[in-house]
Amino acid sequence: MRDRAGVAGAAGDAGAEGAGVAELAGALREAVRGEVGFDATARALVTMDASNYRRVPLGVVAPRDADDVAAVLEVCRARGVPVVARGGGTSIAGQATGTGVVLDFTRHMTGLLELDPVSRTAVVQPGLVLDRLQEAAAPHGLRFGPDPSTHSRCTLGGMIGNNSCGSHSVAWGTTADSVRELSVITARGRRLRLGPGWAGAPDGLRELAEGELARLRTGFPDLPRRISGYALDALLPEKGADVARSFCGSEGTLGILTEAVVGLVEAPRARALAVLAYPDESAAAEAAAGLLPLRPLTVEGMAADLVPAGAGLPAGGAWLFVETGGRTAAEARARAEDVVRAADTVSALVVTDPADQRALWRIREDASGTATRMPDGTEAWPGWEDCAVPPARLGAYLRDFRALLAAHGLRGTPYGHFGDGCIHVRIDFDLLTGPGVGRFRRFSEELADLVVAHGGSLSGEHGDGQARAELLPRMYGEETVRLFERAKAVWDPDDLLNPGMLVRPAPLDSNLRFAVLPDRPVDVAFGYPADGGDFAAAVRRCVGVAKCRTTTAAGPAVMCPSFRATGEEEHSTRGRARLLHEMLAGELITDGWRSPEVRDALDLCLSCKGCRSDCPVGVDMATYKAEFLHHHYVGRRRPAAHHTMGRLPEWLHWAARTRTAPLLNALARVGPLARLGKRLAGITPEREIPRLATRTFTGWWRGLGPAGGAGAVGGPRAGSAVDPPAPGAGGLPEPGAGNLVVLWPDTFTEHFAPSAGRAAVRVLEAAGLRVALPPTLLLRRGAIADGRTRAATALLAARRARVCCGLTYVSTGQLDRARTVLRRTLDLMEPVLRAGVPVVVLEPSCAAALRTDLPDLLPDDPRAARLSAAVHTFAETLERHAPHWTPPAVDRPVAGQTHCHQHAVLGDTPDRRLRTAAGLTGDLSGGCCGLAGNFGFEKGHFEISRACAEEQLLPSVRQAPPDTVILADGFSCRTQLGQLAGVRGRHLAEVLAEALDRRAGGAE
C-alpha cells in the first residue's frame, strides 16, 4: 500500500464530516511511521473479505511495529473511531471488514522473530504468512500444526483471531492448542503479555470468570471444533486459567495482537495418503469417526460435485482423504494400508508419491473457491461455511442438513474436516433480491437450531463474525451471551475494537456486499457466457479466497505475477476485482468506466490469463482489463502504446508490403533515432526494438513453389492458400479430406520469427501431414488452394486480406477494432471451416485469443465457435492427427517456461508428451516471463517485467547445464530471454526440425 494523500472528502460527505476525516488522517500521519491511506483505492481494497459482507472504512494504516499500533489506537480512541485488525483478508464471516480504521498487518509486521528448535517454539508477528513459518521450521523437522487451506496467504494473526484449524486438526488441534503467549494492546493502550495462570489478564477478567465458574463448566459444548463465542472456559482453574488461549478466536474484538509465541510439532518424515471411496457423503461421514482410533493426521471428506474429471480418484460418490505419517515411507504406507483395511469402503487407493499427494490436496484446498459455482454455473455463497457437530453425529447431521436444504429449495455441496465433524459448504442463496435474502435469514435460523440439536457449534473454524453472531443465543442461551458482552466490556469498555462482531452484532442479512451492485446488466463488449452475459456476475466471481496473493508461484502456476513483484493488494487479482466491484457500486469509486483508480490498478495486469486457470473460481482479469480499457478510452485520447503496439499487425503488414524491414532495422540501431522513436511510441527506453525479418514467413512460403520445395518431405504439399482458386480446382481436397492442416501465420511468426514457421512446416510434413496457409482473398465462395492456379471469375469478386487473431487489439482494449478484424478473419476462413480442417497455431497467445476471445467477442456468430474449436497447438496437432509418428530423438535436457496462455487456456499435456517422446528431459518452469506482449515494452513497466522474469524463468535458464535446450514457444518469452539473459530460446518446432535435419544428414 503506497502512502496516499487524497484525504479531502474521503468519507464521501462534504462539510464537517469530511473535515473530520481529513483531520483524522492527518493525525494518523503525524503519529505513525507506517503508511496511511484514506483515498478511494486504499479503502476499496478492504471493503470486503471472503464473506458475503461489505463495510466501507474511513482509512487504512499499515503499522510498522507495536508502537505504531499503540499510536493508531490512541488517535482513534480520542475520536471514537473503531479499529479493525486485518491479516490476509480471507475471513468468511465478515470480521475482517470495518467502518473505521483498518490495520493492515501484511505490509510490515510480517516477521519471524525467532525460531527455537529445542523448545519447539517460534516468535511471530501477526502479518507473517503461515507458509513462511512452515518453510523456516521444515529444516528442523518441525511445523506449525494447524494448516487452513489458505495456508499460502493467511496470516498467523488472522489464524489466532479466528482460532483457525485446517486439515490436520485431528492430529494437532486448533490454533489455540499451539499458542503459548500473546502480546496485545488494548483499546485503551495497555500492553499485555497473555499466557496461562492469569498472565496478562486485564483488570476485572479474573473476577468475572471466578464469579461464573458453574456456567463456564457447563455452558460450553465439549467438541473438538467449538469456535463460536468467546473461549471463556479456558479461564477455568482446571484448564490453567490460560488468558492467551481464551483470547484466541476473539476476532479482534478484545485487543490488537502484535506478537505471538507459538508451539511447533514434529513433522512426520514420510507421509502416505489413503483415498477411501464411498457411495455418498453421508456414508463417508459415518465412517470418519471410526478411523480416529488409528490416529491419522487427517480425515477430510469431499463429494463428487467438487472433484474435476480425471482427478484419478477411486470410483465412488464421495471420498475420505486420510493421511498417515511415519519415520519411513514404508511405515507411513503400512499405516495407510491399516486405514484401508479398517474402513468399509467401495474402493480405495494408497498414494505415496509426494507429487501425486500434492495434486490431490490441491483439489481439496481449491474447494473453497470451486464450491462457489454449482455444476450448472449457479452462484453459491458462504454464510454457513463451517458448522461443526460431534464427529459421531456427522452422518445423521448431514442427512438432516440435506433435508433442510431441500425444504428451502437450496443446493450446496458439503466437504471438509469429517474427522472433526466440521463441514464446509457454499449454498446457492439468492442474495440479490429481497425474497432471496429473506429465505437466507429463515434458513440460517433453522440451520442454527439444527446444529444445536446435534450438539454442535455454529462455527467450527472460521469464527462467527457477522454471519453467525446474531444466532449465538440459540447455541449458548441469553445468559451466556450476556456473559460474552461483560467480557468484551472488561477488555474494551469503549467498544472500539471491531464493533458489531460477536457481541451486539449487526443483523446477519445487513451489509451484504451484493446490495450495492447494479440490478441490471451493464452494457459490455464481451459475451461472458459463463456469467449469463452479466459483467457484475463476472466480477462477483471473486469471493476473496486470495489464492492470487501467494508470494511464490507453486509448480506450474502463473497467478498473479504483478502481485508477487509488488506485494501490493491493488496489483493482485483480488484487489483488481474489488476495485471493479466498487466501480460498479459507485459509492467509493464514482467515475465508473472513467475511474483512474481502476485504470492504475489494471495497468500492471500482464493479461497473462493465469487467474483464468489458477483462481479456483476462474476470475479472468485479462478479459476484465480489456473490457475496462474499451470503455475507459471511448471518445478519449489513448496512450501512444495502444496505437503502436496495439495496432502492430497493421504496421508490420505495411512494412512487409513496402519492403522497408531492412531500413527500419537499421534506424532502430541508431541511438538518437531509436530513443526518439521509443519515446513517441510509448515504449520504455530500456527495451531494444526487436528486429524485423527481412523475409516474412508467407514470403518464404510463396518462394517454395508447388510440390517438393525446400523442406518438403513425403509427397506433394497441399500448398499455399494465399491465392485460392475456385472450388475443386487443381485436384484440391474436398471437405473433410485426410491429412490436411492449415498453419496460421500469426503476426509474430510472420514478421519476427519466420524460422519457427519454417520449422513447423518441416516437422508437420515429416509427420505425414499436408500443410496449407489460410486464404488471403475474400471470395464469395472459396476453397483451400494449392497456390498454383487462379480462378479469374473468383478473383474479380475478391479482395486481398490477412487473417488475424485480434490479440493486440484485445490486450489494449480496442474491442470494436478487434471485432472488425475477427469478422474479416472469419470471412477468410470460411472455406477452411467448411472443410473441417484443423488450424495449427504456433504462438500460444494467438491460439488462446482464438480459443477464448474470439467466441466471447462474437458470441452470435456461429463461425467463431467453429474456428475456436478448430484451433490446435503444434503438439496437439501431432498428437491428434499424426498419432503414429515418432519424433526424432533429441536426448537433451530442457529449461525455459511454459507460456502463461498455454498454461491457462490451452493446456500443455500434449507438449509434455511430445517432449518425452523426443527425449527432451526435465520440466519447464511456471510463472510468467514478464514481457507479456506489449506489457513489458510499455513505458513504466520495465522493472516489473524484469522482476517477473527473475522469479522463475531467468534462474531456471542460468542454472541449466551447458547442453540444455532452452524452450520458449512464445515470441514474448524468447524476446525476454534474449534481452535480459542473452539466451536464444527456441520453439519446440525448431528443436524438432533441427533434429530431423541431423537425422536426415546421418542417413545420407
Image (tube, helix red, strand yellow):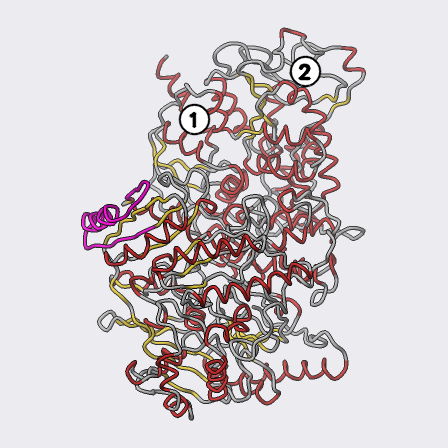
Q: Indicate the position of residue 335 as horizontal and vertical percent values.
A: 21, 51
Q: Pick whichever, 484 or 908, lies toward us.
A: 484
| Residue 394 picture location, percent across and down | 39, 58
Q: State the extent of the magenta-drawn residues as a range.
A: 321-350
**Circle 1 Cα neighbour tier, 10 Å, few/some/many (<14 / 14–19 / ≥20):** many
Identify the residue under disc 2.
783
Q: Considering the image in quadrants, where does the C terminus appear? A: top left
Q: Residue at x 52, y 89 (%)?
A: 493
Q: Position of residue 256 (x, y in %)?
A: 47, 80
Which amino acid, by three-letter code, is at mark 2?
Ala
Q: Is residue 346 magenta?
A: yes
Rendered view: 28 above or below 790: below
Q: Is residue 525 above or below residue 101?
A: above
Q: Residue at x 59, y 90 (%)?
A: 78
Of the numbered discs in the image, which one, if any, rests on residue 992?
Answer: 1
Q: Dot 2: within a 10 Å radius of its alpha carbon, few (fewer than 14), some, or many (20 or more) residues?
A: many
**How far is disc 1 from disc 2 in space, using C-alphas?**
31 Å
Is 3 left, or right, of 314 in this rendering? right
From the image, state whether disc 1 or disc 2 is nearer to you.
2
Left-right relation of 46 to 388: right
Residue nearer the viewer, 482 or 939: 482
The mark found on residue 727 in the picture is: none
Which element is circle 2 on? Answer: loop
Quadrant (top left, top right, bottom left, bottom right) of the N terminus: bottom right
Q: What kind of element bears circle 1?
A: helix
Q: Earlier in the sequence, mark 1 or mark 2?
A: 2
